[in-house]
Amino acid sequence: MSYTPEDVTVDRAVEIRRDLHMHPELGYEEHRTHDLIVEELGRLGIEHRGGLAGGTGVLGWIRGRTDDAAIALRADIDALPIEEETDVPWRSTHEGRMHACGHDGHTAILLGTAANLAARAADGGLDRSVLFVFQPAEEGLAGGKRMVEDGVLDGSIAPMAADRIYGLHGWPGVPEHVVGSRVGPLLAASDRFEIEVIGTGCHAAFPHHGADPVVAAAAITTALSTIVARNCDPLDAAVVSTTVIEAGTGFNVIPGSARLGGTARSLLPEVRDLLERRIAEVASGIAAAHGCEATTRYERGYPVTVNHAEPTNRFREIAVETLGDELVQDVDRPFMGGEDFAYYGQKIPACFYILGQQSPEAPEMPPLHASTYDFNDRTIPTGITLMSRLSQEG
Ligand code: NI
């Protein structure tokens, strides 16, 4: 059995990718994207249910010959609030919206995989059942969590449950067609914090009449950056980045309050607990030293994306068989970015892998979330071929 997509499948997937790129939609607003996916699955004769995860998620499925549980394949479909600055003919037509993380490519690859597998199913049937998970709102809004809660994996929507899941992400710093993964943590837990510093406002010429929350906020920012250096085990990865400082309205007024915000990343539960505790302690201790008060709100976001050994080893074997040794890379260290693919892996064995995007003759690609990012269409057939095989042998 061949898993190589036909040219027509690839051409259609590229067409879809560019169409999606022109019409990016933010998390939970992906109505046009949802309709396009539903229409495409319908055209392919693939059973599906839309309207999931609050309205814009879609689950498709093809029944296989065996009674084994299905293998699920996942793509995220949402875009970012970024004004696109490329000059490609398919650049965004939605002001302030852009597919800067390549989810247009992920969606096109999964639809191409669906087309490829639908053709195989019509031509003698598939061994394994397959689920196609199109999830909204990966960018910070946990669409994956809602898809899981809606039952996309457990057989309450499709007639079959899944016993493992695969997902991919285009990776700009890696040569095109190269895929890679690792067993264990691949992406970090991604949390956010907000600190309100309450002082006493006064005339800026008479600072001794008040308690300056701006000076306190600056000291807190500096002190927060010591948590990783002084409180975490040097061999445990962690990040604390303060990314928001807001205060004040006038050059001669010391304001009554200041606000800080940022992100905390970790790979281990105990490090996550430590960051949560220390950020609040440091904020209130430093604030008190300045005669101010601080309240910290720590919000846990995506959990660590953990790759399970069995599907990840299987991914590696299949990738080597399909693409050859030279196109398969072991990712030696996790990335501190976050991914809501983590929620699927909390339910069933999971493997998330990267798909290299850098073409040798093109200038160096901008990073993910850059206003000039554009998914590399040449990697679409690579993604389709690999996902198709994983769906049957993974
Ligand atoms: Ni992404």
Image (spheres, rainbow, N blue to C red):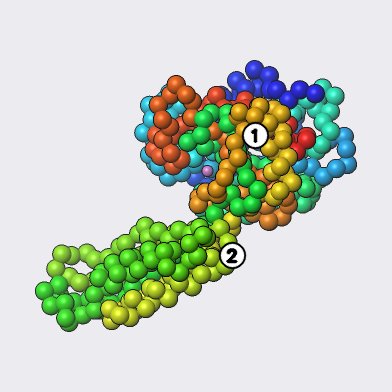
Q: How many marks?
A: 2
**Mark 1 vs mark 2: which is more N-terminal?**
1
Q: Amino acid at mark 1?
A: Leu
Q: Amino acid at mark 2?
A: Pro
Q: Is residue 363 among what the camera can see?
A: yes
Q: SS for tag 2?
A: helix
Q: Could you tell whether 205 is left or right of 54 in the image?
A: left
| Residue at the (30%, 80%) spot, across then down | 289
Q: Could you tell whether 147 is left or right of 391 in the image?
A: left
Q: Position of residue 168 (x, y in %)?
A: 61, 39
Q: Position of residue 261 (x, y in %)?
A: 39, 62
Q: Is residue 372 above or below residue 208?
A: above
| Residue at the (38%, 63%) spot, across then down | 225
Q: SS for tag 1?
A: helix
Name the residue that disc number 1 marks.
110
Q: Could you tell whether 304 is left or right of 66 in the image?
A: left
Can you say which quadrant of the picture contains the C terminus?
A: top right
Using a 10 Å C-alpha cutoff, classify the residue at mark 1 as few (fewer than 14 neighbours), some (14 to 19) or many (20 or more).
many
Name the residue that disc number 2 marks.
269
